[in-house]
Amino acid sequence: MAAKLGATGRRLELGMQLRHLRENCPPTEKDRNLGMTRREAVRGMKGLSEATLSRIEGGEINFRRNVGNLRALLRRYSVTDVELIEQLVELNRDAPGEDWITQYRSFMPTGMPHYVGLEAEAIAITAYHPMLVYGLLQTERYAKALLEAHRPVEDTTAESVKRNLELRMERKERVLRPKDRTPARLRIILGEAALRTPYGDDDVMREQYREIAGLAQEDHISLQVMPFRRGYRSNNDFTILNLGTLPARVQTDNAWGAVSTSDKPREVDRFSRRFDAMVGVALGVEETIDFLEKLAKG
């Protein structure tokens, strides 16, 4: 049975369906064979701009309490199927108690809230991190040392560090030890530099090595280390989210800290092929565990 969609998944499903309806509805302009632009769709509607509709179609937000605009939009798209209308109205309702991300939004870079919501709903996650320990594998002490190390450069407040640390540990708990669903399957490749670059003291790093080695032995987690040796490797980190019934998404970070995601099949496939190419170059799972245990012993 497919997992029940959470708040972010519901918004994404609603947005996808609305975009499909808009692009395939009867045209309002004579030179169009099918569909209408977002500008045409919101023309004359109060409280609904072209930019807002774009965010709704992208699954970032929903109509919140203004369900009247949703119904008006469906009429504009010539949707008369009562069952479909009620299905979309139901999708627009927030899943109770699931939008836990709200309390952290003010500390998160552009695009991050949407990604974090999808991450918690993924059935499988594939990630490559060459320079830092992947966030879902980090211990609390390593994560704190990492956040504090970046403080002087990013001019981050102590409160921001505290809240970001809480968010990171919350994400880890929701993905690796969820209370209401089967844990996501993880396939992770870490660059050797991610393990060699120290954050915190030696004790913090040894604890982090032991944490990763322990997670690598769990049935739903496959973990490999990319050693310092010749062979193909991606230049940047990325994460691919398998969302089950929803399209898979690939996520990358930019130099400004913003998060970029794409559900275009060619982009997801491109990064999937990059990961698969690195699997053969990286250490095997058992070799990786041995490597980590040696690091932990110093």
Image (spheres, rainbow, N blue to C red):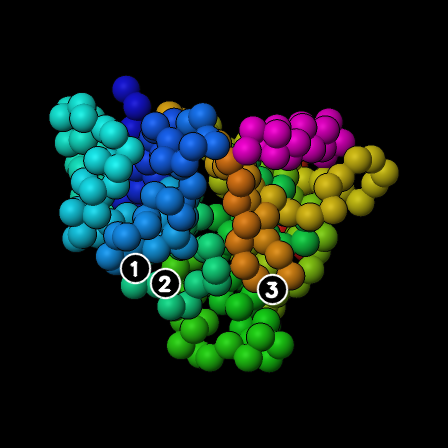
The mark total stands at: 3
Residue at x 59% of width, y 48% of height? 252
| Mark 2 → mark 3, Cα distance in angstroms | 17 Å
Residue toward you, 136 or 15 = 15
The secondary element bearing badge 1 is classed as helix
Q: Amino acid at mark 2?
A: Arg
Give the residue at mark 1: 102
N-terminal label among 2 and 3: 2
In magenta segment, residue 269 = yes
Residue at the spot of label 2:
105
Q: Position of residue 158 (x, y in %)?
A: 44, 79
Q: Is residue 195 left or right of residue 4?
A: right
Q: Position of residue 245 (x, y in %)?
A: 37, 25
Identify residue type, mark 1: Thr
Disc 1/disc 2 C-alpha distance (Å):
5 Å
- Few, some or many C-alpha atoms within 10 Å of disc 2 (few <14, some 14-19, many ≥20)? some
Q: Tell me the magenta residue range.
A: 264-284
Sooner in the amino-acid sequence: mark 1 or mark 3: 1
Q: Secondary structure at mark 3?
A: loop
Q: CA distance from mark 1 to mark 3?
A: 22 Å
Farthest right residue in view: 230
Residue found farthest to the front: 30
Q: Nearer the viewer, residue 31 or 40?
A: 31
For the question of whether residue 35 can be seen, the reply is no
Residue 256, numbered circle: 3
